[in-house]
Image: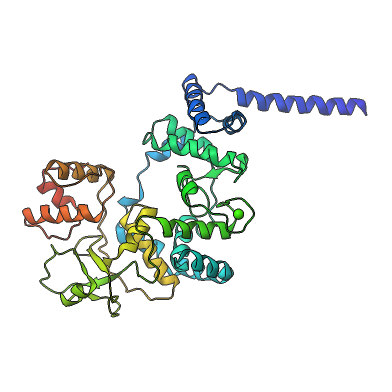
Amino acid sequence: MILRTLAALLFAATVASSAQAQLLKPRGVQFDQFVADLWKDAQAKGISRGTFARAFDGVTPDPRVIATTTKQPEYNKPAGLYVNQIASPANANEGRKKEVQWRSTFDAVEKKYKVERSVILAIWGMETSYGALKDKWDGIRSLSTLAFAKYRDPYFRNELLIALKIIQDGHIAREKFVSSWAGAMGQTQFMPTNFVDYAVDFDGDGKRDIWTSVPDILASTANYFAKAVGGWKMGMPWGFEVAVPQGFDLMKSRAAFDEWSKLGVRRADGKPFPQTGDGILFFPAGLPGPAFIVTPNFEVIKDYNDSDVYALAIGQLSDMIAGSPIPKTQWPAQATQLPRDDRIALQKKLAELGYDQTRFTAHIDFKMRDFVRAEQKKYGLVTDGHPNAALLANMGLKRS
Ligand code: CA
């Protein structure tokens, strides 16, 4: 009996010491220095020594995270292919099932936050297939790897410090703190700062649990939309596909709905424009592709993820979930978007030319599309506001 206990103890000791050896495996002087420096900032933000030590226990930089940052991102895919993969009948059907399953929660969330359930469902479906796709990365390890590598510095370092606060506040246990490779957390993929700004405890257990509590997830996402730039306007469509008349002056990009109507622009679904409000004319794949008029709600979706095709995919998926048939959009098969480096080069060139271009992050907004229209006009190109290879060539910019 005693011998068996001793043997068990010895075995346990061996396991413990090998685990310890793993933890003590040298993780590099530079990473240790990074953690030591971080502690000073963490302490200043009210993180306890205990939280900090537990968070970094055994954490090493993750080479897979760095490898992921260099992968070719989504936007080399043609816009139409991307949008149609997200705004698919299968995704819409699944969304409607989730709506039935969580109907009373959606009733309460819609009442409190004034954001339609269809758009919350679309975000949930897009980000994690309604929770079916689970976060697989250790959030602290991913964020510290990106911060240590000074990737988009100081963004990830700040996110990491906030992540430590979330753990300290007890919303999630350290070992359950999982995220995407880039630190986006839970079923609708909040970054730590989003969590602090928008996550809410809707099931009343005292924790803001965006990983497993569906009421918390849905309410937090609605709260984001309610408070994001401009704020979601309930009852206002995100936008709609339109047809522009022959010979339409494409320099015109912004107008009130009644003016669009007078100019002969028509909704593709045949419905009338809203009574009041403004919209922006937008060609996500250039003139050969579909035209849309988008509202300020589109900008709210872009605040969630700053990509036109993302927002378009969310908008169309939400319409399908709500049961509105969407027009059979004809997308040009070959219309890829400009790679990130080309977008940044274009942004810098626009600023050099004296346009009020102040963002150099590769993200394209409607202000930039108007600058692009002006340059297209200068070179006698179609003024659809959509930057492409022909424009870059005319402006003397080399393709990356
Ligand atoms: Ca909760």
**Compared with residue 312, is residue 161 higher up or lower down, i.e. above or below?**
above
Classify the position of ligand 1 by quadrant: top left, top right, bottom left or bottom right: bottom right
Q: Residue at x 8, y 57 (%)?
A: 377
Quarter of the picture containing the C terminus is: top left
Q: Is residue 283 left or right of residue 113?
A: left
Looking at the image, can residue 292 be seen?
no
User: Picture coordinates of residue 95 (x, y %)?
Assistant: 50, 67
Total count of labels: 0
Q: Is residue 22 left or right of residue 231?
A: right
Pick whichever, 220 or 132, lies toward us.
Answer: 220
Give the quarter of the image for residue 351.
top left
User: Picture coordinates of residue 388 (x, y %)?
Assistant: 19, 52
User: Picture coordinates of residue 164 (x, y %)?
Assistant: 54, 37
Pick whichever, 72 or 96, lies toward us.
Answer: 96
How is the rendered protein coloured? rainbow
Looking at the image, can residue 350 be seen?
yes
**Compared with residue 62, is residue 108 higher up or lower down, i.e. above or below?**
below
Q: Is residue 76 left or right of residue 25?
A: left
Q: Is residue 302 left or right of residue 121?
A: left
Quarter of the picture containing the N terminus is: top right
User: Picture coordinates of residue 398 (x, y %)?
Assistant: 16, 41
Q: Residue at x 14, y 42 (%)?
A: 397
- Which residue sits furthest right? 1
Pick whichever, 80 or 34, lies toward us.
Answer: 34
